[in-house]
Amino acid sequence: MNRLRIKKLGVFSVAKIQSLVMLVVSLLISIPYGLIIIVYSLFGASMIGGNASFAVGGGGVVVGLLVMIGLPIFYAIIGFVFGAISALVYNLFSGIVGGVEIEVENVV
């Protein structure tokens, strides 16, 4: 067994990975949530009837689509920013305390 110590993290590398992880997680959440918004708004619009139903149904569809498109983009940007900040903080403190030690094994 070999012991290794992670002294520094690549800031841009961590930010990219964190951004991608947040994008995938937010897609898993925002697509069903957006579909629920669309279904409920169309169901509510059918209960109203008349010209007001077009406004309610159309508005709900627009909001649902914005949720499905906008939230993943927002989460990816936030993930990139906070991934970069977390890598910078790790690099700062690893210089003080020595970093994280891991144990690895050579596999043949």
Image (cartoon, grey):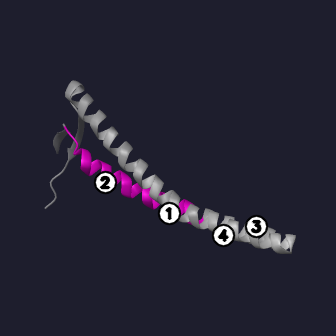
Q: Where is mark 3, residue-wise?
A: 56
- Span highlighted in magenta in the image: 8-32
Q: Where is mark 4, residue-wise?
A: 61
Based on the displayed image, in which of its 4 quarters is residue 100 positioned?
Answer: top left
Query: Real-space Cα distance between discs 4 and 1?
Result: 17 Å
Q: Horizontal placement of 1 versus 59: left or right?
A: left
Mark 4 or mark 2: which comes first in sequence?
Answer: 2
Mark 2 secondary-structure assignment: helix
Question: Depth-wise, is mark 4 or mark 2 nearer the camera?
Answer: 4
Mark 3 or mark 1: which comes first in sequence?
Answer: 1
Q: Is residue 98 above or below residue 56?
A: above
Instruction: Check if mark 3's residue and mark 1's residue have beta carbons within 8 Å.
Output: no
Q: Position of residue 6 (x, y in %)?
A: 20, 40
Query: Real-space Cα distance between discs 3 and 1?
Result: 25 Å
Instruction: Check if mark 3's residue and mark 4's residue have beta carbons within 8 Å.
Output: no
User: Badge 2, how many Cα within 10 Å: few under 14, some, many 20+?
Assistant: some
Q: Residue at x 81, y 69 (%)?
A: 52
Q: Nearer the viewer, residue 80 or 22?
A: 80
Mark 1 secondary-structure assignment: helix
Q: Where is mark 2, residue-wise?
A: 16
Q: Residue at x 20, y 48 (%)?
A: 104
Is-magenta flag for residue 18? Answer: yes
Query: Real-space Cα distance between discs 3 and 4?
Result: 9 Å
Q: Horizontal placement of 14 versus 61: left or right?
A: left
Mark 4 or mark 1: which comes first in sequence?
Answer: 1
Amino acid type shown at disc 3? Val
Q: Horizontal placement of 44 versus 93: left or right?
A: right
Q: Nearer the viewer, residue 89 or 94?
A: 89
Is-magenta flag for residue 5? Answer: no
